[in-house]
Amino acid sequence: MMGRVRGIGTARKWFRKHRIGYLLILPSCLFVLGFIIIPLFEGISLSLTTEEFGGRGAVFAGAANYVSLFRSDAAFWQAMLRTLVWAIATVAIVYCTGLALSTLLNQDIRGRAIFRSLLLIPWVIPNIVVASIWRWMYHDQFGFINSALTGLGLISQPIQWLSDPTLAFISVIMVFVWKYTPFMTITLLAGMQSISHDYYEAAQIDGASSFQSFLYVTLPLLKPVSITSTLLLSIWAFNHFDILYVLTGGGPSKATTLLSIEIYNRAFFSLDIGYAAAMGCVMLLGLLGFAVLYLKSYAQTAA
Amino acid sequence: MSDRRVKRTRKRGLKTVLVYVLLIVACFFAVTPVVWTALCSVRPISELYLGKITLPRVLTFEYYKRVLDQTMFISYFLNSVKVAGLATIISTFIGATAGYSLSRFRVPGGHQYGVFLLLIQMFPPVLLVIPLFLLIKGFGLLNTHLGLICLYPTLTLPFTTWMLRGFFDTIPRQLEEAAMIDGATWLQSFLKIILPVSGPGIATVAIYSFLLAWNEFIFALVLVQTKALRTLPLGLAAYMEDFGIRWDLLLPSATMAALPMMIFFMFMQRFLVKGLTAGAVKG
């Protein structure tokens, strides 16, 4: 539409106008390029090869990895299912506990700051320390839990918290809940504190009980915060690796092998890099659905 | 009338008691594992493997001495301090420049870039770690701290950028405009006007970055295999693998890894809470 000379002139002007803005974003872009974008594409291209550690090097294999992944990899789909159950269970429990605790902390009582500090403690404990601590808590002979239960006369045989497959899955869910509940509590508390007092007064004038105003005022107004924080937590739960890797190593008999652990083992123990990358790509595809939801809700909250 | 009032106050009193009881129970669950670990780390060996819940009768620091003398705990700790410290500086710097640009310059594509940053938060680390291992190995950066120091700021970018962008947005533009009219360049106005009032925002971002780098495990696990270069999480995991589980080493080192975080957190709680909620709550 424009003449070429004028076009160049405008481009130069445009560039000069935005030069500093772009210059300031540049360092950030370089890091993202080097550590996210390039690895991502490298990962996708690896997934199309038969790359193995110490093998003959990558051979292009087209969709072969994906075909065998979808056709015959029972372990992968079991891990996928397990991860979904894990994510739904942890997020549901964390949300309910977080909601209860934030409601309690939002009451007009003394010592709120102290309670809040104490409840936040699990959040600052590094995950590997969390795993060590709980491995000691769950210890069948010397652990706190079995000692306490024996001391109270509730059990006579020690409970095998981490050696029984079903029990181990429940035990690790509880550890994740312990670590991540503070996040939900504080987020929801901040959401509750940003609700104007007028709503509650209006509800009270209309004769609402405190339970009714919780149900009809707090919960609806908390919806945006709830959605964003729940989605964020779902993503963390779905991608989770470190606590379980150290606490149970994915065992006993794969009962706590989440997708991340399955993929990690495939890449760094079986040394099947190409295949593991394909598993990772399928996992990413599943997450992108979440991502769209998250972005939508974030845009709504920020607007 | 007065009867009803008495009833109401009594009901309210009952409710307050209930709130306290529930909060105390919750705090018990939150704190017990940490306190129990710390208590066990100072028990003599005769009281460690009892299977009973008692307070330690004698305090001993022999396990601490053992960890510090016989294992490489101190160098793990210092490695973590170094990696997390440098990563925090880079992370805060690139987050601040990008956040400032998104807040003030509004370049075409800037907003889309910000949204893209949110998206990368959900890429599975385990997918990225495989190609990163090969790439970093290719550049000869395997078994160095440099790889981690540059990687961690990238992982925190979504948070740092959005947090600081939001923070800069709340600083009135008129201040800078007035300075610009007086002949200041954007750099001078950034350094003299924006930075001095951005303390809380910068602190929040720095704390978040430090926590992430201090805690990070999977990337460190893959990118650092030399014993001497291990960060603290790797060192702790090794106490469970290298020697079987050595509780006498694990309990004191877990305590020592958690303690600085807890003390730090007591002083910095305001910023930590702010960082925690920023991701999900507007403002």
Image: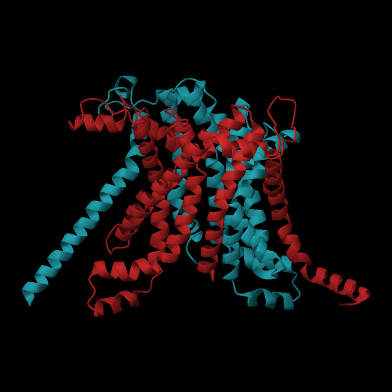
Chain colours: A red, B cyan
User: Whole-percent x and y of residue A32?
Assistant: 68, 51
Decide which of B62, A2 is in the foreground and name it: A2
Please indicate, yes or no, whether residue B191 appears anywhere in the rendered image.
Answer: no
Decide which of B264, A140 is in the foreground and name it: A140
User: Whole-percent x and y of residue A152?
Assistant: 18, 33
Location of residue A132 by image quarter: top left
Q: Residue at x 55, y 47 (%)?
A: B210
Q: Residue at x 16, y 60 (%)?
A: B14
Q: Quadrant of the N terminus of chain B?
A: bottom left
Decide which of B260, A132 is in the foreground and name it: A132
Q: Is residue A180 left or right of residue B6?
A: right
* Position of A256 relative to B204 (above/below): above
User: Whole-percent x and y of residue A295?
Assistant: 56, 61
* Position of B37 relative to A8 (above/below): above
* Position of A30 relative to B72 (above/below): below
Q: Is residue A135 left or right of residue B147?
A: left
Q: Is residue B200 left or right of residue A188?
A: right
Q: Residue furthest front?
A: A71
Q: How many marks on residues?
A: 0
User: Whole-percent x and y of residue B85?
Assistant: 60, 44
Please indicate, yes or no, whether residue B215 appears anywhere in the rendered image.
Answer: yes
